């Protein structure tokens, strides 16, 4: 298929580009390189541009006649969305509106969207199902959920337009072949930051909140290997090609680890006892977010292959040590 991938030079997008490129799809990456890297694009063509530039995107769509769009481009740092919500609604919501309207205009009827577990907020037992009430704790979560709503309404009004929103839980790890990984230096993801501390690229690791109602007082998350997440996109695309209906699906493994458990395992895997600073809670963090992904597994052929925290940490650390870009 001819596929447009916005944000395909970023962490997750680049792993999806590789997965879909290996399957033989014709890929065009559209990315402004604000947090992405040219070197991360291992298949297809890279067009440097901003999703806000509708004229440029419209022209590209007219020329390339894409059959599907995968939309990764966005701003992703939760605390930043609390301090600068206007920028987050611009990049995540308004730019998505522009992209969806261009897809409609150019008759591109398959759309896969990077949504997030952050739309769920505080969930009583921490386990999120797709029917769990939507209650984001921060502008980031709202900015992504608003895009889900636009997709839902567009698909209801124009039934040929089909979308899948994949709600990612905590994405981590790196390509097991070592070709790509997470490179943005200001990334706030726990495993990435802990691996930076283990490599001596960060003086210490900050742990936010030790008084959450969890087993050890630190937040619990469901960590999904980025290569498994990439294959979930290939499965979601197949689902749409085979006539699957528009829908939202959780992407996680269904079990969680606390921040302390992750830190301990990073120390064990890397053999480095880095310094950890315990700080008060950070704005916008839910205590526990674990995916129930039964719906995705039932609807598609998705079969995760790297469901192991040690593997996730090992691949992230190996990438961090060599990080060529
Ligand atoms: N990393 C996670 O754990 C996680 C969890 C849930 C959802 N997501 C979603 O997944 C998507 C990708 O996240 P990521 O971790 O790969 O982040 P990333 O920052 O590595 O990738 C985002 C990419 O989009 C590009 N980009 C940003 N704004 C753009 C714009 N206006 N025009 C063109 N390109 C633009 C960046 O240059 C970058 O290459 C995001 O939409 C994010 O909200 C990520």
Image: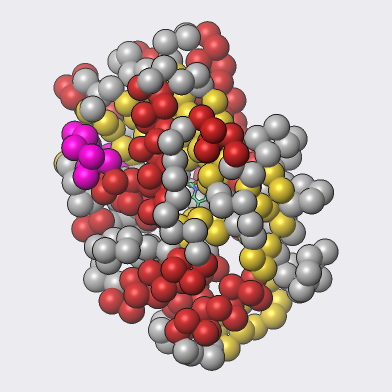
Residue 143 appearing in the image: no
In the picture, which quadrant includes the C terminus? bottom left
Query: Quarter-wise, where is residue 277 in the image?
Result: bottom right
Residue 219 appearing in the image: yes
In the depicted structure, whether residue 209 falls above or below residue 149? below
Query: Quarter-wise, where is residue 58 in the image?
Result: top left
Residue pictured at 44% horizontal, 45% vertical:
303
Q: Position of residue 84 (x, y in %)?
A: 58, 51
> Observer-nearest residue: 253 or 172?
253
> Observer-nearest residue: 83 or 278?
278
Q: Position of residue 263 (x, y in %)?
A: 58, 77
Question: Residue 133 vs residue 181: left or right?
Answer: right
> Observer-nearest residue: 91 or 37?
37
Residue pictured at 40% horizontal, 36% vertical:
235
Question: Residue 280 vs residue 43: left or right?
Answer: right
In the depicted structure, whether residue 197 falls above or below residue 3? below
Q: How many marks?
A: 0
How was this image coloured? Answer: secondary structure
Q: Position of residue 160 (x, y in %)?
A: 42, 10
In the picture, which quadrant includes the N terminus? top left
Q: Magenta segment range?
A: 20-31
Say if the magenta span includes residue 6: no
Residue pictured at 50% horizontal, 19% vertical:
245
Q: Position of residue 265 (x, y in %)?
A: 55, 78
Residue pictured at 44% horizontal, 59% vertical:
306
In the depicted structure, whether residue 224 falls above or below residue 247? below
Question: Residue 10 vs residue 303: left or right?
Answer: left
Query: Quarter-wise, where is residue 74 in the image?
Result: top left
């Amino acid at each position: 298929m001819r596929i447009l991938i916005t944000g395909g030079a970023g962490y997750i997008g680049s792993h999806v580009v590789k997965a879909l490129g290996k399957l033989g799809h014709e890929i065009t990456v559209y990315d402004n390189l604000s947090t992405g890297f040219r070197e991360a694009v291992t298949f297809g063509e890279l067009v440097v541009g901003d999703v806000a530039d509708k004229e440029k995107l419209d022209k590209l769509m007219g020329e390339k006649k894409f059959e599907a769009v995968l939309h990764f481009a966005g701003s992703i740092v939760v605390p930043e969305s609390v301090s600068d919500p206007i920028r987050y609604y611009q990049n995540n919501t308004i730019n998505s509106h522009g992209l969806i309207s261009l897809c409609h205009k150019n008759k591109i009827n398959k759309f896969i969207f990077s949504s997030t577990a952050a739309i769920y907020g505080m969930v009583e037992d921490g386990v999120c199902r797709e029917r769990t009430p939507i209650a984001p704790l921060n502008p980031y979560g709202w900015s992504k959920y608003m895009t889900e709503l636009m997709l839902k309404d567009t698909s209801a009004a124009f039934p040929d337009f089909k979308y899948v929103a994949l709600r990612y839980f905590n994405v981590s790890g790196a390509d097991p072949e070592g070709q790509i990984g997470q490179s943005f230096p200001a990334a706030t993801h726990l495993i990435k930051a802990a691996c930076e501390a283990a490599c001596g690229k960060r003086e210490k690791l900050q742990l936010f909140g030790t008084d959450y109602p969890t087993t050890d007082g630190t937040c619990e998350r469901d960590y999904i290997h980025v290569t498994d997440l990439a294959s979930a996109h290939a499965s979601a695309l197949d689902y749409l090609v085979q006539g699957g209906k528009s829908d939202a699906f959780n992407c996680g493994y269904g079990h969680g680890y606390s921040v302390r458990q992750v830190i301990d395992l990073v120390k064990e895997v890397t053999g480095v006892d880095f310094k950890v600073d315990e700080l008060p809670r950070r704005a916008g963090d839910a205590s526990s977010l674990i995916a129930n992904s039964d719906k995705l597994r039932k609807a598609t052929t998705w079969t995760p292959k790297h469901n192991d925290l040690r593997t996730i940490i090992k691949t992230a650390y190996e990438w961090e040590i060599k990080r060529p870009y």
